[in-house]
Amino acid sequence: MSDYDTFQTEYATYTGPWLLRLYIAGQSSKSTTAMTNLRRICEEHLAGHFCIEVIDLLEKPQLAEGDKVIAIPTVVRKLPEPLRKIIGDLSDTEKALIGLQLKQKPTAP
Amino acid sequence: MMLSSGASLGSPQKLIRLLLVEDDPVEAGLVEKVLSEGRAVDFAVQRVPDLTTAKMVAQAASFDMVILDLNLPDSQGVETLSQFRSVVGDSVPIVVLGDTDDDGNAETALYGCEAEFLGKLHLDHRIVPRLLYHLLQRQRSESGLRQLIATYPDGMVVVNVDGVVLFANPAASDLFGRPIGDLINQQFGIPVVGDGAIEIEISGRRIAEMRVVKINWLEQNAWLTSLREITERKKMEDELRDAKVEAELSNVAKTHFLTCMSHELRTPLNSIIGFSEMIEHDILPDRHETCREYAGIINSSGKHLLAIVNDVLDVAAVEAGKVVLDCQLLDVNLVITSSLQMVSRLAREKGIELRYQPLPYMTPLYADYRRLRQILINLMANSIKYTMAGGTVILTCQCNHDGTLTLTVEDTGVGIPSTDLSNLMKPFSRVGDPYTSRSQGTGLGLYITRVMVELHGGSMTITSELKRGTTVVVSFPAERVLPYRA
């Protein structure tokens, strides 16, 4: 398994809503990739109880201050607490899942 | 100064230049003796008795390391160390010589001061020289690594498993535009990179390529994130891509232009050559009458050709930025009347009603006479061209409240599909396919007209409805209009 396993914490018991905030800058290909990946990951692993808020820093640069975002694309997990941040376009699903501390799907036997 | 001839440890450093700051001659002698008895390393020792002299000597010459007694005639305690440190900087290792009975106190005081402690009772010639030597080597390799990281051109950020920054080098601080101290303990975020690298954007529109490796940092799992700035490279890539697209577009435009042009130029030339050949070969049934008719055709074909060539030359001048306006105050009504004369025959021949609503009073416009006429004639000829017999073309001139002047050409013609509207004012565009379209033209007219209007600081808008007609509004800015004042 991956190196990231050691860092994994499972959120198996949390059943409340997941509130994720994605910071992007304009409609660049990086931004779109991150958005598509995040949506796909959430639909596969959090179907029905997630909410993605997309914040375009080109339109609202002042919002970067709130979550202290210093690089984009960044995903901020507002809920469940504690706050967690991920930098990257999330194209590596497995690492993104672990970064978000989303419980991994059991692999097929 | 004394030298001992022991075997060296085989390092590049054969001789260690040491500054000994000690006021007690007995203790100083002891230290010197111990150093000289060591078999492994050679020391060149210079001894000074107080802090003031020590500072002076340290400023004048460079030393590899310093042995410092904290209690000197002119300075006491840790203050001695910090004062001396401020003179020699961080790169020189300092060994504090302390009384063994207050070891504990001295060592506590030294915590965090970047100095080593040596008890006076522990001066052993088998240990101390080697200790000092290894201390120097460690200092050297550490400062080498530190320098490596500090001058490394890529940003290095170490974050823990929660995304909190544990370490950042100067390149990272520069990339993020904040001091290293501001980055440490901040939530950077957990870097998620697949195989290879990803691009991230850093506030201030800088782009970096991020790579991540898992490391063990001070006993805990962490990620070392390397950030290579690629802003310039990206900019160049973007520029190259734009240039390529532009070149391709201009190539398409060129091909399109040649296609249009060869067609447009050949048509009148064929008439000219054909009819003149018939005259030349004298195969005319009714020589005099037909000759006149043919001469008329040749003449109008020639004029048509001239108009096309003029358009092409205009576009070439526009593209080269060589069109200069020759402006003067003009009576708009007069310019319009003279332009109408040019197109009225065309309208009459096609059976189109040409209406004109003049301004009720003389309105001077600061414009280029020839170009203003060109604008008017182009627009009206265009409207006449795309309007069927029985239709109407109306030219209206109006002074507005905001001081601007608008010229409106409205027709009841075939109209323009909305998909073509946006391309209409670009060069070489014509509604429909040049081969199938029944109308003639190079597609340069509206482009030239727009450019001429814009050269006057004005604007041109086109609205159209299929089968209903087209309206072109040309507006000149207020500063070019001298309004009528009663």
Image (tube, coloured by chain):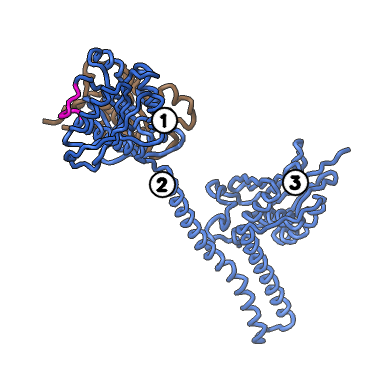
Chain colours: A brown, B blue
Which of pointers 1 and 2 indicates the residue nearer the eye? 1
Q: How many marks?
A: 3
Q: Amino acid at mark 1?
A: Met
- Is residue B94 rendered magenta in the image? no
Image coords of residue B117 (percent x, y): 25, 22
- Is residue B126 rendered magenta in the image? yes
**In the rendered structure, the residue with mark 3 lies on which chain?**
B
Q: Quadrant of residue B201?
A: top left
Image coords of residue B41 (percent x, y): 20, 36
Image coords of residue B404 (percent x, y): 74, 41
Mark 1, residue position: B56
- Which of disc 2 and disc 1 is earlier in sequence? 1
Q: Nearer the viewer, residue B468 or B38?
A: B38
Mark 2, residue position: B233
Q: Amino acid at mark 3?
A: Thr
Q: Nearer the viewer, residue B10 or B17?
A: B17
Marks 1 and 2, Cα distance to the nearest angstrom?
50 Å
Question: Residue shown at 17%/38% (left/top)?
Answer: B6
Q: Quadrant of residue B305?
A: bottom right
Q: Is residue B4 left or right of residue B164?
A: left
Which of pointers 3 and 2 indicates the residue nearer the eye? 2
Do discs 3 and 2 share a chain?
A: yes
Do discs 1 and 3 share a chain?
A: yes
Image coords of residue B179 (percent x, y): 42, 29
SS under mark 2: helix
Mark 3, residue position: B396
Which of pointers 1 and 3 indicates the residue nearer the eye? 1
- Crowding at dot 2, Cα within 10 Å, few <14 / some 14-19 / many 20+, comes out as few
Residue span colored magenta: B122-128
Majority secondary structure in the magenta region? loop
Marks 1 and 3, Cα distance to the nearest angstrom?
93 Å
